[in-house]
Amino acid sequence: MAKIYTPAMEKIAKKNAKRKKPRQSTPGYEAWKRFKRNKTAFVGLIVVGLMILIALLAPLIAPYDYQAQDYTAMLQAPSAEHLFGTDALGRDVFSRCIYGARYSLVIALFCVLAAFGLGGGLGIIAGYFGGKVDTIIMRIMDVFQAIPQVLMAICIVAVLGNGIPQLVVAIMFSAMPTMARNNRAAVLRVRSNDYVEASQAIGVGQGRMIIRHMIPNAVGVMIIYLVGFIAASIMMMSSLSYIGVGLAAPTPEWGLILSDGKAYLRTAPYMMLFPALMIMITCYAFNLLGDGLRDAFDPRLK
């Protein structure tokens, strides 16, 4: 028997059709909702986004070439013409700080990727296989961790020389033990779950198990460490450049700008003030973002 629709029933059917279906809840969506409720973390995300935008649009934002020298405008205080003043060679400090965001953020990102690829990969292998493999890898990491990070980075740069690749290698090896331990702990948290045992029972290969099952479920914890390590990389990079074993002039890296201004601390303190503020604001924003991600990926904070 055919179903008869009355005008009232058709009106209700149209309303139901227009009504939006409730969005399916996923762990990522729930984490994003928790992250949005954290105002300080959201401020950190905005500041990090602005820094990335500044790095991308540096040629459009900077009013001068960061290498351009004007000997008629040396050591000028901040003004409308030079917002952050000029250095001892007449270079615009504002333009150098803007381009410094490009160097600092890009190099820090390469350091994070390199440390995650080497140290993080070893930590994942150690956490998954356990036993002798875990013991051997972590004892090697203990040897590296016994050396202070900054001291190890200084030694590596002293051997390899100054330059961006050498700096990335130095920071990568100095941070490798910490990255390995963090990723090992993240994998150990998910290794004992039921879906891992079920996958092993049906014969899933070890490589597929790690890539398709364990890493995606531990990626939340790994991301927290990665974001925090970006701030640590910027600090270490600036420290190495400040003491003269990082990047070489005339690279507009924040630590190198600080190093150039230390001789004029009394006569031109702005030469150190503004790059120091750039380092502080950027690292603080990444730390806020990392804390927010930690809370967002914690399922207990619903």
Image (cartoon, rainbow, N blue to C red):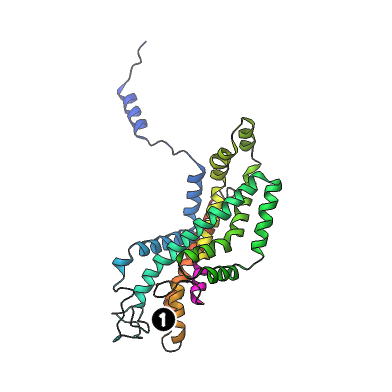
Where, quadrant-wise, is the N terminus in this rendering?
A: top left
Let me know if residue 35 is in the magenta part. Answer: no
Residue tagged by mark 1? 271
Q: Give percent across and percent down for residue 278.
A: 43, 71
Q: Is residue 205 visible?
A: yes
Residue that protrudes farthest toward the top in the picture: 1
Q: Nearer the viewer, residue 269 or 174?
A: 174
User: Looking at the rendering, which quadrant does residue 47 occupy?
Assistant: bottom left
Position above or below: 173 against 15: below
**In the image: residue 16, left or right of residue 25:** left
Q: Give percent across and percent down for residue 272.
A: 44, 80
User: Looking at the rendering, which quadrant does residue 199 occupy?
Assistant: top right
Instruction: Identify which residue is drawn at 63% across, 68% down.
Output: 148
- Which element type, helix, strand or loop, lies under badge 1? helix
Q: Is residue 295 visible?
A: no
Q: Which residues are magenta?
A: 234-242
User: Looking at the rendering, which quadrant does residue 68 occupy?
Assistant: bottom left
Callout 1 amino acid: Met
Q: Give percent across and percent down for residue 224.
A: 54, 55
Let me know if residue 241 is in the magenta part. Answer: yes
Q: Give percent across and percent down for residue 131.
A: 71, 46
Query: For mark 1, does the 10 Å Cα neighbourhood hold few (<14), some (14 to 19), or many (20 or more) residues?
Result: many
